[in-house]
Structures are given as C-alpha cells and as structure tokens.
Image (cartoon, rainbow, N blue to C red):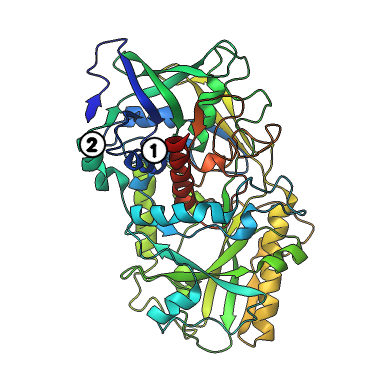
Amino acid sequence: MHLDARDLDNNTIIEGDLCIVGAGAAGISMALDWNKSGKKVILLEGGGFEYDSEIQDLYSGNSTGQKYYPLRSCRLHLFGGTTGHWGGMCAPFDPIDFKIRSWVPDSGWPITLDDLVPFYTKAQNLFELDAYNYEFQYWQEKHPELTPFPLDKNIIWSKMWQFSPPTRFGKTYKETIVKSPNIHLYTYANLTNIIANEEVHDIKQLIVKNHEGRTHKVRAKNYVLACGAIQNARMLLASRGQTKKGIGNDRDLVGRYFMEHLEVKSAQLWLKKSFSTDLYTFDYSTRKPRAELALNEVIQEEAGILNGSASLTPLVIAKQQTPLIDLWSNKDPRKSYDRLVANFRKSREKKDTRKDENGNRAFELYTRMEQAPNPNSRIVLSAEKDALGVPRPQLHWELTELDKYSIRKMYHILGEQMGKANVGRIKLEEFLWDENDNSMPDQLGGGWHHMGTTRMSADRNKGVVDANCKVHGISNLFIAGSGCFSTAGAPNPTLTLVALSLRLSDYLKTS
C-alpha cells in the first residue's frame, strides 16, 4: 500500500508493528522480508518515486578535513535510494574484517563472518546475482580463460567480485512494496524528531514532516533507522527533546568513526611480457566476475597494515580518466553522475582500448583500502537548519598514519612478489615515494561509502549499537545499514549492509 504523506490530514497518527525509516537498499530489503507476514510494517520515505531537487536539498551539508564530495550529491533522496546510481559491485567481507587486530585500533566486531553468511545468501538474490560463491576455483571452472598471475598464493590471493545488473531497488521492487497487503509505504514523510520516554529507555513516537506543512506522528512497537550512516547519526544527534546530547549518545559516540574506502590511483604495473588479464579486468558487456589482488591475512598481520585490494585498468584507458573526487563535484547528483559516465566513455573511445603501443603490458593499479577506525573522523551538527527545521550535518573526514602506511606497504609487498615471480615491475605514484610523508593527495577519493557513525560493539562504551543493531540502552530502537560497521573492510559495503539488515530483520521477527 502506498500513501503520500502530503495528502494526509495534518497531525495524522500512523501506527503499526514495525516502522522502518528510509527506503533505500537497507530499508526496502527489510520491508520485503516482512511482506505477507501479517504484521503492519510502516516504511517511511522522505522523497517520492522521482528525483525532486527540493527533497534532495535536505541532504546538504558541509565538510572539513580531507577533501570530500558534496554531501548533497552523495546520496539519492527518493524511493530506492542510492541504488539509483549504484555501480553493482558485490563482494563479502573477509574473516579478518571482523577480528580484533592488535595493529588496528578499535578493530573487532561482536559478530563473525559466519554469522552473516546465511544473510549474504538472501542478499545475493535481492541483487539478482549468481550463486553465493566467491571462491576463485569456482569461477575458474565456469570461465577457464580466467588465469591468475603466478604469484605466491600464501602472500597474494585473488579476491573475487560479482556484479549486479545493477539492481535498481526503486524500480525492481516498487510494485511488490506498493501492492503488499501489510507494507504501508509513506512517501514525502521526512523524519525530523525521535521522541523517547522520560528515562530515554524506549522510543514513544517519531515526528515526520514535509514541505507542504504537514506534520504526522508515527508509533510502532519497534523502530529501525535505515537512512544511511550520515542521516542516521544526524537524526540521533538532532533529537534532543529528552537528552541534550541526542538519542543514544550518552557516551558521545554517535557520529564518530565515520569511515570511507580510500580509493586512489597508486601505481603502475609493467608486465615483462603480455599476459591475459581477463581475470582482473571488468568486461562491461558480460559483467562476469573479476578479481582484485589482495594480501592474505597472515601477511597483513606481519606487515601491520589494513585490508585492501588493487584492481587493474589498462594504462591507455586510465590516463584518460579523471579522479572521481574531481568528477563528482556538482551538488546535483544527476550532473555529477553524467560527468562520471561521460569521462568513463571517453576513456574507452580508442578503437582497441585493451591494447596500446605497450602491447597490453601496462596497467594502472587502483587501490580500494579500508579506513582505520578513527573517533575524530565524524559527523556533527552545524548551526544551519534545513527547510524542515533539522540541523544540517557537517562531516569532518580525518585519516591516520596507518591509512597512508598501509597503501604504501601493500604495493611494496605486491611489487616484491611481482619481481620474484618474474611477472613484471611496479612503479609507485609520486605521493607514495616519501616514507615520512603521511599526507594524502588531493586525488584521493572514496566510493561514496559512508560507514561507522553508529558502530557496533558489545561494550556500550565503545559503540552505539549492540550485536543485534539495537541502540544501547533503548529497548526498541535499531539501526540498519553500514553505519553499524565496526570496521570498513575492503569491498564495497552494499552487499554486506543488506546482509546485516536482513540479519536484523530476522532478529526482530523472533524477539
């Protein structure tokens, strides 16, 4: 069922069993999991089914620290959320991502990879992917032409990725949601306040508003915030009716530990002789799985570095590509997206983009590295308010010495192994030459992957939510999505955030 909150009488009271705030990948996945359950599910979406500039402006904010994209254009504020311009890259986290690592401050989750595997399988289906199998041997049997570099497998491994079509949740699942007998979708229902009881142990109701001046109250047994890492933290911090620090923020942890993936052109790989790189280069016509080069867990520990991977792009193509941080600079996400696609197509205009004068021997190595958890990298509220009266977010993106060291060390190890195997040589980009320079280059970008602002921990002194994504100290408030990540892992977060949301959904059904 679909209702437009702009058409409801002012001060309408909306009641149900479960209220999910946000209809992006996390929120829609959870709602679908409750379809035909007999429970009344309220799904709140701040926008509509189409892009609306006035609605999009509610995501505006400022940033300081390491250069970042305009917050207004990092997320799409409409039904389906940012899956509307998502690229479709999927891979699960690695076992090491969930472990306490002595060399990574504040690492460790209260759950393991095994806890997520059943929900990865369910998430796989939502993204219209093949079997939940990310082992190289499995894919090599299906595609014998996929040949790895002859590197020491005890040091370097091939981390596999699958590629969703990509699934646009707003289009793919709209009919199911709208026609569901028990899911009540309210569009143009923007959360503006979370109201708890006097002791702040339970949430009593939510206040939602829209630009047409309508205000409504939402009441449910359980509430799930699924608005994304920045907006979830923003709403908790802005809800100060019962506590001056904001809901769930008695330990001053809400908004802290903001993480992104460190994505940057880092090196060049020059092969000794031509080698089939089908395993490592993405085929946009077939979208078949590919691999990235990654370091094994033992090697990461010995080197004292973060988890990351390196992808290959033919150098002839890479030289034509502008860094993402410069391409995605317009506050209108549609214009930034168009610039990115145009640059991508331009880089492939040559008659044979896989070969050049170097005989298909020269490649760019592009890093995707987890960011070390850092409490000083955070979301706070600014003095400016949006059109609905909610303080705008301000991001301070701050990196650490471990981030830069990890990128440099990963390529030192990779270069050493390429040389030992007589495969080729690696040339570092200039920003990695000086081992005493811990600054990051202006070309460093991220994947628009917002993580960690409501991090998970069994200890309420170290995290905002527990192992079941419940806000510490509050009986009926939960967080869905990548804001719960304790560490960022190396892969894109979409598959994992949906798996984690489905795990939360399963918990709520049985609690």
- Of 194 and 510, the residue lying toward us: 510
Asked if residue 326 is positioned above or below residue 252 in the image, the reply reads below
Amino acid type, label 1: Gly
Which residue was labeled with disc 1?
27
For image coordinates 64% across by 59% down, the residue present is 96
Quadrant of the rendering where the N terminus is positioned: top left
Residue 39 found in image quarter: top left
Asked if residue 395 is positioned above or below residue 173 in the image, the reply reads above
Q: Distance between the residues labelled 1 and 2?
A: 15 Å
Determine the secondary structure under disc 1. Answer: helix
For image coordinates 64% across by 76% down, the residue present is 426
Left or right for 261, reference 175: right
For image coordinates 55% across by 33% down, the residue present is 470
Amino acid type, label 2: Ser
Residue 27 image position (x, y, % from top left): 39, 38
Quick one: which residue is furthest to the right in this view?
A: 436
Asked if residue 5 is positioned above or below residue 496 in the image, the reply reads above
Left or right for 21, reference 267: left
For image coordinates 63% across by 52% down, the residue present is 98
Considering only order in the chain, which callout, 2 or 1, is on the residue closer to the N terminus? 1
Residue 443 seen by the camera: no
Residue 376 found in image quarter: top right
Residue 314 is labelled as none
Residue 383 image position (x, y, % from top left): 56, 19
- Of 338 and 212, the residue lying toward us: 212
Which residue was labeled with disc 2?
180
Quick one: which residue is furthest to the front in this view?
A: 510
